[in-house]
Image (tube, helix red, strand yellow):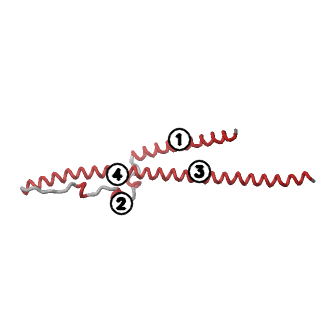
Amino acid sequence: MKNKLKQKGVALLIVLSSIMLLSALVVEVAYQSNVTYNISMNEKERMEAYYLALSAINFSRIVIKYNKEAQQLVSQASQGLGRSIQVQPLYKMIPINTAIIRGLLQASGGAKALLRNHPLRMKIRREEKNRMSWKLQNKACQQSMRKRRKAF
């Protein structure tokens, strides 16, 4: 009779232990998904910033190129008229900031639509995948090492 009374408490301990382990597992999975989401959002923002900067550089090159042409046209016109004509440089007339470039990209379907098959983008994507897989492998290795240390 005494033996049966002792066994009733063991079942309760087993159930509580299994619930505790399952809840710890759920918390860990939720944490890992949150970390993965944050990593992917950071990579997305980094990629957008990179292409935004690249497009700003290209936009600046265009403005500089056409500024030279505009200055040549103004000097030819001033020679034809026989008097000096003063025109501001294009970079002062066209404000170069990210709002303009973002607007242009959004109007054309976004940076992805413009640069979908760009070779540089493909190369960066491959490098990012390699780096991310290495990071994930390294992180998994570190976690397994921590678990082994805790076990001992």
Using residue 123 as the reference point, say whether residue 81 is left or right of it. Answer: left
Q: Where's the N terminus, which quadrant?
A: bottom right
Residue type for callout 1: Trp
Q: Of marks 3 and 2, which one's residue comes earlier in the chain?
A: 3
Q: Is mark 1 on a helix, strand or loop?
A: helix
12 and 100: which is toward the camera: 12
Q: Mark 3 points at which residue?
A: 32
- Name the residue: 8% across, 53% down: 79
User: How far apart are the alpha carbons under marks 3 and 1?
Assistant: 16 Å
Q: Of marks 3 and 1, which one's residue comes earlier in the chain?
A: 3
- Name the residue: 44% across, 50% down: 46
110 and 82: which is toward the camera: 82
Q: Mark 4 points at which residue?
A: 55
Q: Mark 1 points at which residue?
A: 134
- Name the residue: 35% across, 59% down: 99
Q: What element carries label 4?
A: helix
Q: Mark 2 points at which residue?
A: 103
Q: Of marks 1 and 2, which one's residue comes earlier in the chain?
A: 2
User: How far apart are the alpha carbons under marks 4 and 3?
Assistant: 34 Å
Q: Of marks 4 and 3, which one's residue comes earlier in the chain?
A: 3
